[in-house]
Image (cartoon, rainbow, N blue to C red):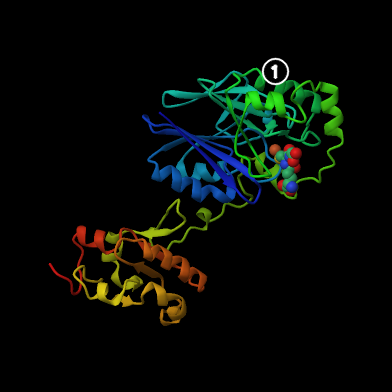
């Protein structure tokens, strides 16, 4: 079974793709974005996958890759094409190479033109391909910087992408209109720059008159990506909170485990956001917890101490996740959700005040 996820970085309209073998649980991540490393790592952990490598379709001009950060977080190898000119990678691939994960693999096809080192990754059974910025949905990558060349781009698309099976799904590196996927048949027919009877000279004419401004971040992104996203100065691990061993979820919430809270009772203030009847009910409550029902939290947040971390708790961990968002909006920056709420707290046998045995 193949696990396949398309993830977006809304700021740069970049797509990141997670592919994994559902049986072996081994994964690769294509074109990760620096700012999304924490999100991507959370998804990989929740799906129970081991990230073997991050791999790049090219040296990006509009965002910094998350390759180096993922290597630090997940121990993944960094893969780039040998023709990319990037330094600091663990794996340099070229045309025809296979990048394996479990029993599956991606085949590398050199598709230069947008940049000299661009590649397309084709899944083993040719059911899908990740085209990077070579072929976009009803568009193409530009060819006016990073040794781009419209003629070379045209030939790459026709020789390496349009020759794939008609039903092969194509997933691009970007889409600026929110489109997500296309197919070889569709682009052969309807791509306004490259499809139908459009020839190489037609394409070159089109591309020389694109008149696009350079990407806003190009002067920062290209040098950083030529070093696989390694910053000048190593940041404190993605600036993750360090007041407790917290887990970041793909849902976007910082969680704390019941065991740690039981062992460190004085380190935090606990806010219980259930209703008063639940607080006094059979599940009991955590010793010292302050009751502020979720509906009152926004206006009563000032009752909590500013300088001390806050752990929010409810019955099952759902309402308290929303409580962490409310507290963050109220300016609290050390906030976590008690994973599983009182139900898990009780199930693990931690101490309660009140409640029934
Ligand atoms: N406005 C974007 C520029 C985006 C851009 O130039 N994207 C490149 C890919 S790195 C491209 O090939 N765009 C093709 C197009 O927009 O038609 C930014 O500032 O980042
Ligand atoms: Fe690009």
**Numbered disc total:** 1
Q: Quadrant of the N terminus?
A: top left
> Regarding mark 1 in the picture, which secondary structure is present there?
helix
For the point 64% across and 51% down, the residue is 11
Q: Is residue 336 above or below residue 148?
A: below
Dividing the image into four equal quarters, which quarter contains ligand 1?
A: top right
Characterize the local packing of mark 1: few (<14), some (14-19) or many (20 or more) Cα atoms within 10 angstroms. few
Q: Nearer the viewer, residue 130 or 102?
A: 130
351 left or right, relative to 39: left
Q: Nearer the viewer, residue 205 or 116?
A: 205
For the point 45% across and 77% down, the residue is 306
For the point 36% across and 29% down, the residue is 23
Q: On the image, which quarter does residue 147 sit in?
A: top right
Residue at label 1?
Answer: 159
Q: Position of residue 166 (x, y in %)?
A: 61, 20
Q: On the image, which quarter does residue 275 sit in?
A: bottom left
Q: Position of residue 225 (x, y in %)?
A: 66, 41
Q: In which quarter of the image is the C terminus?
A: bottom left
The response on whether ligand 1 sits within 8 Å of label 1 is: no
Q: Which of 354 and 332 is in front in this view?
A: 354
Q: Where is residue 18 in the image (x, y as percent from the top left)?
A: 50, 37
186 left or right, relative to 73: right
Given the current orientation, which residue lies at the most extreme left position?
357
For the point 25% across and 75% down, the residue is 277
Q: Is residue 336 above or below residue 47?
A: below
Q: In this view, does 324 lie above or below 107?
A: below
């Amino acid at each position: 079974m193949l696990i396949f996820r398309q993830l977006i970085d809304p700021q740069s309209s970049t797509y990141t793709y997670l592919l994994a073998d559902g049986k072996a649980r081994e994964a690769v991540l294509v074109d990760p974005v620096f700012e999304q490393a924490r999100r991507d790592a959370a998804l990989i952990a929740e799906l129970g996958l081991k990230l073997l490598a991050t791999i790049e379709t090219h040296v990006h001009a509009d965002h910094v890759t998350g390759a180096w950060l993922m290597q630090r977080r997940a121990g993944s190898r960094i893969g780039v094409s040998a023709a990319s000119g990037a330094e600091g990678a663990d794996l340099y691939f070229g045309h025809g190479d296979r990048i394996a994960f479990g029993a599956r693999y991606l085949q590398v096809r050199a598709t230069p033109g947008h940049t000299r080192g661009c590649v397309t990754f084709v899944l083993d059974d040719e059911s899908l391909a990740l085209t990077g910025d070579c072929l976009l949905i009803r568009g193409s990558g530009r060819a006016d910087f990073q040794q781009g060349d419209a003629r070379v781009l045209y030939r790459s698309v026709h020789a390496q992408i349009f020759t794939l099976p008609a039903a092969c799904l194509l997933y691009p590196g970007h889409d600026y209109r929110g489109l997500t996927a296309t197919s070889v048949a569709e682009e052969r027919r309807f791509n306004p720059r490259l499809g139908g009877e459009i020839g190489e000279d037609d394409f070159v004419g089109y591309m020389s008159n694109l008149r696009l401004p350079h990407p806003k971040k190009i002067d920062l992104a290209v040098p950083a990506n030529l070093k696989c996203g390694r910053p000048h100065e190593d940041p404190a691990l993605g600036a993750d909170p360090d007041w407790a061993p917290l887990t970041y979820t793909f849902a976007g919430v910082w969680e704390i485990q019941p065991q740690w809270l039981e062992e460190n009772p004085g380190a935090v203030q606990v806010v219980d956001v259930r209703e008063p009847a639940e607080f006094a009910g059979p599940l009991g409550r955590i010793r010292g917890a302050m009751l502020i029902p979720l509906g009152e939290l926004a206006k009563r947040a000032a009752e909590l101490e500013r300088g001390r971390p806050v752990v929010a708790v409810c019955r099952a961990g759902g309402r308290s996740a929303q409580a962490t968002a409310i507290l963050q909006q109220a300016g609290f920056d050390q906030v976590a959700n008690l994973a599983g709420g009182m139900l898990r707290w009780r199930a693990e046998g931690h101490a309660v005040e009140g409640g029934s045995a």
